[in-house]
Amino acid sequence: MKRGSRLSGMLHLLLHMAEQDGPMTSERLAKLMDTNPVVIRRIMAGLRDQGYVRSEKGHGGGWTLARDLARMTLRDIYTALSCPSLLAIGNRTESPGCLVEQAVNAALTPAFHEVEELLLSRLGDVTLAMLSADLHDRLVARGGHQKLEHVHASRRTKH
Amino acid sequence: MKRGSRLSGMLHLLLHMAEQDGPMTSERLAKLMDTNPVVIRRIMAGLRDQGYVRSEKGHGGGWTLARDLARMTLRDIYTALSCPSLLAIGNRTESPGCLVEQAVNAALTPAFHEVEELLLSRLGDVTLAMLSADLHDRLVARGGHQKLEHVHASRRTKH
DNA sequence: CTTCATGTCACCTACTATGTTACATGATCA
DNA sequence: TGATCATGTAACATAGTAGGTGACATGAAG
Protein backbone atom coordinates (compact mmCIF):
# COMPACT_ATOMS: atom_id res chain seq x y z
CA MET A 1 0.00 0.00 0.00
CA LYS A 2 1.38 3.36 -1.00
CA ARG A 3 1.93 5.94 1.64
CA GLY A 4 -0.56 8.41 0.22
CA SER A 5 -3.44 6.00 0.46
CA ARG A 6 -3.20 5.33 4.15
CA LEU A 7 -6.30 7.30 4.97
CA SER A 8 -8.26 5.71 2.20
CA GLY A 9 -7.05 2.27 3.17
CA MET A 10 -7.72 2.71 6.84
CA LEU A 11 -11.27 3.92 6.24
CA HIS A 12 -11.76 0.87 4.13
CA LEU A 13 -10.65 -1.36 6.98
CA LEU A 14 -12.75 0.42 9.57
CA LEU A 15 -15.89 0.10 7.47
CA HIS A 16 -15.24 -3.58 6.97
CA MET A 17 -14.82 -3.94 10.72
CA ALA A 18 -18.10 -2.14 11.24
CA GLU A 19 -19.88 -4.66 9.01
CA GLN A 20 -18.72 -7.51 11.12
CA ASP A 21 -19.73 -8.91 14.49
CA GLY A 22 -16.61 -10.12 16.19
CA PRO A 23 -13.05 -8.93 16.04
CA MET A 24 -11.07 -9.12 12.82
CA THR A 25 -7.55 -10.45 12.89
CA SER A 26 -4.63 -8.57 11.41
CA GLU A 27 -4.32 -11.36 8.92
CA ARG A 28 -7.80 -10.89 7.55
CA LEU A 29 -7.39 -7.15 7.43
CA ALA A 30 -4.07 -7.58 5.69
CA LYS A 31 -5.73 -9.62 2.97
CA LEU A 32 -8.24 -6.83 2.39
CA MET A 33 -5.39 -4.42 1.84
CA ASP A 34 -3.25 -6.92 0.01
CA THR A 35 -0.42 -6.52 2.46
CA ASN A 36 1.22 -8.03 5.50
CA PRO A 37 -0.31 -8.44 8.99
CA VAL A 38 2.61 -6.69 10.62
CA VAL A 39 1.98 -3.65 8.49
CA ILE A 40 -1.62 -3.64 9.65
CA ARG A 41 -0.56 -3.79 13.28
CA ARG A 42 1.86 -0.96 12.77
CA ILE A 43 -0.76 1.29 11.27
CA MET A 44 -3.56 0.27 13.60
CA ALA A 45 -1.36 0.96 16.61
CA GLY A 46 -1.84 4.67 16.09
CA LEU A 47 -5.60 4.35 16.02
CA ARG A 48 -5.58 2.21 19.12
CA ASP A 49 -3.54 4.79 20.99
CA GLN A 50 -6.17 7.37 20.14
CA GLY A 51 -8.95 5.09 21.35
CA TYR A 52 -10.61 4.45 18.02
CA VAL A 53 -10.01 0.72 17.95
CA ARG A 54 -9.20 -1.96 20.46
CA SER A 55 -7.01 -5.01 20.06
CA GLU A 56 -7.24 -8.31 21.88
CA LYS A 57 -4.85 -11.18 21.97
CA GLY A 58 -5.43 -14.90 21.97
CA HIS A 59 -8.28 -17.04 20.70
CA GLY A 60 -11.05 -15.00 19.19
CA GLY A 61 -8.88 -11.95 19.42
CA GLY A 62 -8.25 -9.27 16.84
CA TRP A 63 -9.36 -5.73 16.19
CA THR A 64 -12.67 -4.14 17.04
CA LEU A 65 -14.06 -0.63 16.81
CA ALA A 66 -13.86 1.13 20.13
CA ARG A 67 -16.05 4.11 19.40
CA ASP A 68 -19.36 4.86 17.78
CA LEU A 69 -19.05 5.51 14.05
CA ALA A 70 -20.92 8.77 14.47
CA ARG A 71 -18.15 10.02 16.71
CA MET A 72 -15.32 9.36 14.27
CA THR A 73 -14.64 11.82 11.49
CA LEU A 74 -12.33 11.27 8.57
CA ARG A 75 -10.22 14.02 10.03
CA ASP A 76 -9.88 12.08 13.28
CA ILE A 77 -8.61 9.10 11.40
CA TYR A 78 -6.25 11.13 9.28
CA THR A 79 -4.81 12.80 12.35
CA ALA A 80 -4.39 9.49 14.14
CA LEU A 81 -2.39 8.22 11.19
CA SER A 82 0.00 11.12 11.75
CA CYS A 83 1.01 11.53 8.16
CA PRO A 84 3.55 14.31 7.65
CA SER A 85 1.67 16.63 5.35
CA LEU A 86 -1.46 16.79 3.28
CA LEU A 87 0.27 18.56 0.45
CA ALA A 88 2.74 17.05 -1.94
CA ILE A 89 4.49 20.36 -2.40
CA GLY A 90 6.01 22.75 0.07
CA ASN A 91 8.69 25.31 0.65
CA ARG A 92 12.24 24.41 -0.17
CA THR A 93 13.51 25.98 3.03
CA GLU A 94 11.48 27.17 5.95
CA SER A 95 13.75 29.94 7.19
CA PRO A 96 15.80 31.06 4.23
CA GLY A 97 18.46 33.70 4.46
CA CYS A 98 18.04 34.52 0.80
CA LEU A 99 15.58 37.36 0.23
CA VAL A 100 14.46 35.80 -3.00
CA GLU A 101 13.47 32.68 -1.23
CA GLN A 102 11.79 34.68 1.50
CA ALA A 103 9.62 36.32 -1.12
CA VAL A 104 8.76 32.96 -2.62
CA ASN A 105 7.83 31.53 0.75
CA ALA A 106 5.74 34.55 1.61
CA ALA A 107 3.66 33.90 -1.47
CA LEU A 108 3.33 30.16 -1.08
CA THR A 109 2.95 29.61 2.64
CA PRO A 110 -0.45 31.28 3.14
CA ALA A 111 -1.88 29.40 0.18
CA PHE A 112 -0.60 26.12 1.55
CA HIS A 113 -2.08 26.80 4.95
CA GLU A 114 -5.42 27.82 3.56
CA VAL A 115 -5.65 24.71 1.46
CA GLU A 116 -4.67 22.41 4.29
CA GLU A 117 -7.27 23.99 6.50
CA LEU A 118 -9.91 23.51 3.88
CA LEU A 119 -9.15 19.86 3.43
CA LEU A 120 -9.01 19.19 7.15
CA SER A 121 -12.29 21.00 7.50
CA ARG A 122 -13.91 18.91 4.80
CA LEU A 123 -12.60 15.73 6.36
CA GLY A 124 -13.94 16.89 9.70
CA ASP A 125 -17.43 17.22 8.25
CA VAL A 126 -17.72 13.55 7.39
CA THR A 127 -18.25 10.87 10.00
CA LEU A 128 -17.71 7.19 9.52
CA ALA A 129 -21.39 6.77 10.23
CA MET A 130 -22.14 8.74 7.07
CA LEU A 131 -19.80 6.55 5.11
CA SER A 132 -21.46 3.48 6.52
CA ALA A 133 -24.90 4.78 5.58
CA ASP A 134 -23.70 5.42 2.07
CA LEU A 135 -22.27 1.96 1.93
CA HIS A 136 -25.60 0.44 2.85
CA ASP A 137 -27.32 2.49 0.20
CA ARG A 138 -24.92 1.03 -2.27
CA LEU A 139 -25.58 -2.47 -1.03
CA VAL A 140 -29.30 -1.96 -1.52
CA ALA A 141 -28.77 -0.35 -4.90
CA ARG A 142 -26.83 -3.34 -6.04
CA GLY A 143 -29.90 -5.33 -5.10
CA GLY A 144 -27.99 -8.22 -3.74
CA HIS A 145 -27.78 -9.19 -0.12
CA GLN A 146 -24.29 -10.45 -0.67
CA LYS A 147 -21.87 -10.52 2.12
CA LEU A 148 -18.82 -8.40 1.65
CA GLU A 149 -16.49 -11.29 2.25
CA HIS A 150 -15.64 -12.23 -1.26
CA VAL A 151 -15.49 -8.96 -3.10
CA HIS A 152 -11.75 -8.79 -2.59
CA ALA A 153 -9.98 -10.99 -5.03
CA SER A 154 -6.66 -11.84 -3.48
CA ARG A 155 -4.31 -10.65 -6.14
CA ARG A 156 -1.13 -11.81 -4.58
CA THR A 157 -0.84 -15.54 -4.43
CA LYS A 158 2.20 -16.42 -2.47
CA HIS A 159 2.81 -19.79 -4.03
CA MET B 1 16.44 19.04 -3.63
CA LYS B 2 13.39 17.19 -2.44
CA ARG B 3 10.67 16.47 -4.89
CA GLY B 4 8.02 18.49 -3.10
CA SER B 5 10.01 21.69 -3.30
CA ARG B 6 10.35 21.83 -7.04
CA LEU B 7 7.90 24.67 -7.43
CA SER B 8 9.50 26.64 -4.64
CA GLY B 9 12.96 25.99 -6.00
CA MET B 10 12.06 26.88 -9.55
CA LEU B 11 10.47 30.17 -8.53
CA HIS B 12 13.63 30.90 -6.67
CA LEU B 13 15.67 30.35 -9.80
CA LEU B 14 13.38 32.37 -12.01
CA LEU B 15 13.51 35.35 -9.68
CA HIS B 16 17.27 35.19 -9.59
CA MET B 17 17.28 35.11 -13.36
CA ALA B 18 15.03 38.13 -13.41
CA GLU B 19 17.49 40.07 -11.28
CA GLN B 20 20.23 39.51 -13.73
CA ASP B 21 21.10 40.95 -17.11
CA GLY B 22 22.56 38.19 -19.20
CA PRO B 23 21.87 34.48 -19.27
CA MET B 24 22.66 32.30 -16.29
CA THR B 25 24.42 29.02 -16.80
CA SER B 26 23.12 25.75 -15.44
CA GLU B 27 26.17 25.66 -13.26
CA ARG B 28 25.39 28.92 -11.52
CA LEU B 29 21.77 27.97 -11.09
CA ALA B 30 22.82 24.63 -9.71
CA LYS B 31 24.89 26.34 -7.05
CA LEU B 32 21.87 28.36 -5.98
CA MET B 33 19.95 25.17 -5.46
CA ASP B 34 22.89 23.27 -4.09
CA THR B 35 22.59 20.64 -6.74
CA ASN B 36 23.97 19.48 -10.06
CA PRO B 37 23.81 21.30 -13.43
CA VAL B 38 22.31 18.28 -15.13
CA VAL B 39 19.45 18.32 -12.67
CA ILE B 40 18.83 21.96 -13.50
CA ARG B 41 18.75 21.22 -17.21
CA ARG B 42 16.35 18.39 -16.65
CA ILE B 43 13.93 20.54 -14.75
CA MET B 44 14.30 23.64 -16.88
CA ALA B 45 13.61 21.61 -20.00
CA GLY B 46 9.92 21.52 -19.09
CA LEU B 47 9.76 25.28 -18.71
CA ARG B 48 11.54 25.79 -21.99
CA ASP B 49 9.08 23.57 -23.80
CA GLN B 50 6.27 25.75 -22.48
CA GLY B 51 8.03 28.89 -23.64
CA TYR B 52 8.78 30.38 -20.24
CA VAL B 53 12.55 30.28 -20.56
CA ARG B 54 15.03 30.06 -23.38
CA SER B 55 18.37 28.29 -23.46
CA GLU B 56 21.40 29.13 -25.55
CA LYS B 57 24.54 27.20 -26.16
CA GLY B 58 28.09 28.32 -26.46
CA HIS B 59 29.99 31.29 -25.12
CA GLY B 60 27.78 33.63 -23.16
CA GLY B 61 25.01 31.09 -23.32
CA GLY B 62 22.76 29.86 -20.56
CA TRP B 63 19.18 30.41 -19.45
CA THR B 64 17.08 33.53 -19.87
CA LEU B 65 13.47 34.38 -19.18
CA ALA B 66 11.42 34.20 -22.34
CA ARG B 67 8.28 35.90 -21.13
CA ASP B 68 7.29 38.92 -19.16
CA LEU B 69 7.07 38.23 -15.43
CA ALA B 70 3.56 39.66 -15.37
CA ARG B 71 2.47 36.93 -17.73
CA MET B 72 3.75 34.04 -15.63
CA THR B 73 1.68 32.81 -12.72
CA LEU B 74 2.83 30.37 -10.09
CA ARG B 75 0.25 28.03 -11.50
CA ASP B 76 1.88 28.21 -14.91
CA ILE B 77 5.17 27.23 -13.42
CA TYR B 78 3.67 24.45 -11.37
CA THR B 79 1.92 23.05 -14.38
CA ALA B 80 5.04 23.24 -16.50
CA LEU B 81 6.87 21.20 -13.89
CA SER B 82 4.27 18.47 -14.39
CA CYS B 83 4.39 17.15 -10.88
CA PRO B 84 2.07 14.20 -10.36
CA SER B 85 -0.27 15.58 -7.72
CA LEU B 86 -0.66 18.51 -5.38
CA LEU B 87 -1.93 16.32 -2.59
CA ALA B 88 0.09 13.90 -0.56
CA ILE B 89 -2.92 11.68 -0.03
CA GLY B 90 -5.30 10.07 -2.42
CA ASN B 91 -7.55 7.13 -3.08
CA ARG B 92 -6.12 3.68 -2.70
CA THR B 93 -7.82 2.50 -5.88
CA GLU B 94 -9.53 4.60 -8.47
CA SER B 95 -12.08 2.11 -9.71
CA PRO B 96 -12.64 -0.33 -6.88
CA GLY B 97 -14.90 -3.32 -7.17
CA CYS B 98 -15.44 -3.33 -3.44
CA LEU B 99 -18.51 -1.36 -2.40
CA VAL B 100 -16.82 -0.31 0.79
CA GLU B 101 -14.03 1.27 -1.12
CA GLN B 102 -16.48 2.88 -3.48
CA ALA B 103 -18.15 4.55 -0.52
CA VAL B 104 -14.80 5.73 0.78
CA ASN B 105 -13.82 7.13 -2.59
CA ALA B 106 -17.16 8.85 -2.98
CA ALA B 107 -16.49 10.73 0.23
CA LEU B 108 -12.88 11.60 -0.43
CA THR B 109 -12.74 12.36 -4.13
CA PRO B 110 -14.86 15.54 -4.14
CA ALA B 111 -12.91 16.94 -1.22
CA PHE B 112 -9.62 16.24 -2.97
CA HIS B 113 -10.83 17.89 -6.14
CA GLU B 114 -12.12 20.94 -4.34
CA VAL B 115 -8.88 21.41 -2.51
CA GLU B 116 -6.75 20.98 -5.59
CA GLU B 117 -8.86 23.50 -7.42
CA LEU B 118 -8.47 25.97 -4.59
CA LEU B 119 -4.72 25.66 -4.54
CA LEU B 120 -4.41 25.92 -8.30
CA SER B 121 -6.66 28.94 -8.19
CA ARG B 122 -4.52 30.60 -5.53
CA LEU B 123 -1.39 29.87 -7.48
CA GLY B 124 -3.03 31.29 -10.56
CA ASP B 125 -3.66 34.57 -8.77
CA VAL B 126 0.00 35.29 -8.22
CA THR B 127 2.31 36.38 -11.01
CA LEU B 128 6.06 36.33 -10.91
CA ALA B 129 5.91 40.10 -11.29
CA MET B 130 4.20 40.29 -7.92
CA LEU B 131 6.86 38.13 -6.38
CA SER B 132 9.53 40.30 -7.92
CA ALA B 133 7.90 43.43 -6.54
CA ASP B 134 7.77 41.89 -3.11
CA LEU B 135 11.41 40.94 -3.43
CA HIS B 136 12.37 44.53 -4.17
CA ASP B 137 10.38 45.73 -1.19
CA ARG B 138 12.41 43.36 0.91
CA LEU B 139 15.64 44.59 -0.59
CA VAL B 140 14.71 48.15 0.29
CA ALA B 141 13.53 47.14 3.74
CA ARG B 142 16.84 45.54 4.41
CA GLY B 143 18.33 48.90 3.57
CA GLY B 144 21.26 47.52 1.75
CA HIS B 145 21.88 47.75 -1.93
CA GLN B 146 23.65 44.47 -1.84
CA LYS B 147 23.74 42.30 -4.81
CA LEU B 148 22.08 38.96 -4.44
CA GLU B 149 25.13 37.11 -5.55
CA HIS B 150 26.57 36.13 -2.24
CA VAL B 151 23.58 35.35 -0.09
CA HIS B 152 23.86 31.70 -0.91
CA ALA B 153 26.52 30.06 1.11
CA SER B 154 27.64 27.08 -0.85
CA ARG B 155 27.14 24.35 1.66
CA ARG B 156 28.60 21.59 -0.35
CA THR B 157 32.26 21.96 -0.98
CA LYS B 158 33.41 19.38 -3.41
CA HIS B 159 37.03 19.46 -2.40
C1' DC C 1 39.52 24.95 -34.00
C1' DT C 2 39.27 25.68 -29.26
C1' DT C 3 36.31 26.75 -25.65
C1' DC C 4 32.07 26.91 -23.44
C1' DA C 5 27.46 25.93 -22.95
C1' DT C 6 23.36 22.93 -23.37
C1' DG C 7 21.03 18.03 -24.53
C1' DT C 8 20.71 13.63 -23.21
C1' DC C 9 21.75 8.97 -22.12
C1' DA C 10 23.14 5.63 -18.82
C1' DC C 11 24.30 4.46 -14.54
C1' DC C 12 25.13 4.96 -9.66
C1' DT C 13 23.76 6.28 -5.01
C1' DA C 14 20.94 7.33 -1.13
C1' DC C 15 16.84 7.32 0.93
C1' DT C 16 12.68 5.66 2.63
C1' DA C 17 8.46 3.16 2.83
C1' DT C 18 7.12 -1.30 2.89
C1' DG C 19 7.49 -6.25 3.35
C1' DT C 20 9.21 -10.08 6.09
C1' DT C 21 11.12 -12.93 9.69
C1' DA C 22 11.60 -13.91 14.28
C1' DC C 23 10.49 -14.02 18.81
C1' DA C 24 8.17 -12.29 23.11
C1' DT C 25 3.75 -11.55 25.51
C1' DG C 26 -0.67 -12.62 26.75
C1' DA C 27 -5.41 -14.84 26.26
C1' DT C 28 -8.23 -18.81 25.45
C1' DC C 29 -9.42 -23.48 25.33
C1' DA C 30 -9.00 -28.39 25.91
C1' DT D 1 -1.00 -26.90 32.46
C1' DG D 2 0.23 -26.85 27.88
C1' DA D 3 -1.10 -26.08 23.02
C1' DT D 4 -2.76 -22.68 20.14
C1' DC D 5 -3.87 -18.34 18.49
C1' DA D 6 -3.51 -13.56 18.46
C1' DT D 7 -1.06 -9.15 19.04
C1' DG D 8 3.58 -6.31 20.06
C1' DT D 9 7.78 -5.17 18.47
C1' DA D 10 12.42 -5.23 17.04
C1' DA D 11 15.49 -6.17 13.36
C1' DC D 12 16.47 -6.90 8.86
C1' DA D 13 15.53 -7.32 3.72
C1' DT D 14 13.60 -5.45 -0.40
C1' DA D 15 11.96 -2.39 -3.79
C1' DG D 16 10.93 1.75 -5.85
C1' DT D 17 12.37 6.22 -6.89
C1' DA D 18 14.24 10.77 -6.84
C1' DG D 19 18.41 12.76 -7.27
C1' DG D 20 23.35 12.90 -8.42
C1' DT D 21 27.21 11.94 -11.64
C1' DG D 22 29.99 11.00 -15.73
C1' DA D 23 30.36 10.70 -20.52
C1' DC D 24 29.70 12.26 -24.85
C1' DA D 25 27.22 14.63 -28.67
C1' DT D 26 25.70 19.12 -30.52
C1' DG D 27 26.12 23.71 -31.52
C1' DA D 28 27.52 28.74 -30.80
C1' DA D 29 31.05 32.24 -30.00
C1' DG D 30 35.59 33.81 -29.94
Image: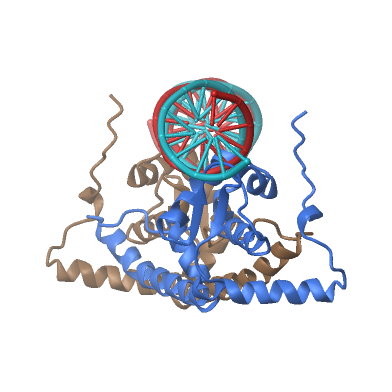
Chain colours: A brown, B blue, C red, D cyan
The image quadrant where one finds the C terminus of chain A is: top left
Residue A42 at x, y percent in the picture: 54, 44
Left or right: B133, with D3 as reference point: right
Q: Position of residue B121 (x, y in %)?
A: 46, 76
* Residue in front for this viewpoint, B83 or B18: B18
Q: Quadrant of residue B13?
A: bottom right
Q: Is residue B54 visible?
A: yes
Against A137, residue D22 (above or below) is: above
Quarter residue A80 falls in: bottom right
Compare residues B92 and D4 and report the one nearer the observer. Answer: B92
Residue B140 point in image, percent of width and height: 81, 75
x and y, in percent, of residue B118 in the image: 47, 76
- Number of marks present in the image shown: 0
Q: Is residue A58 visible?
A: no
Classify residue A12 as left or right of residue B10: left
- Seen from this angle, which residue lies furthest right? B143
Q: Nearer the viewer, residue B93 or A19?
A: B93
Image quadrant occupied by the N terminus of chain A: top left
Above or below residue A82? Residue A41 is: above
Residue found at the very far left of the displayed protein = A143
- Residue at screen point 61% across, 56% down: B9
Residue drawn 59% across the image and 55% down it: B5
Query: Is residue B102 shown above or below D1?
Result: below
Q: In the rendered image, which quarter is residue A51 located in? A: bottom right
**Residue name at image x 39 percent, y 49 percent:** A24
Give the residue displayed 21% in from the left and 56% down from the top: A147
C4 on left or right of B56: right
Which is more toward the observer, A127 or B156? B156
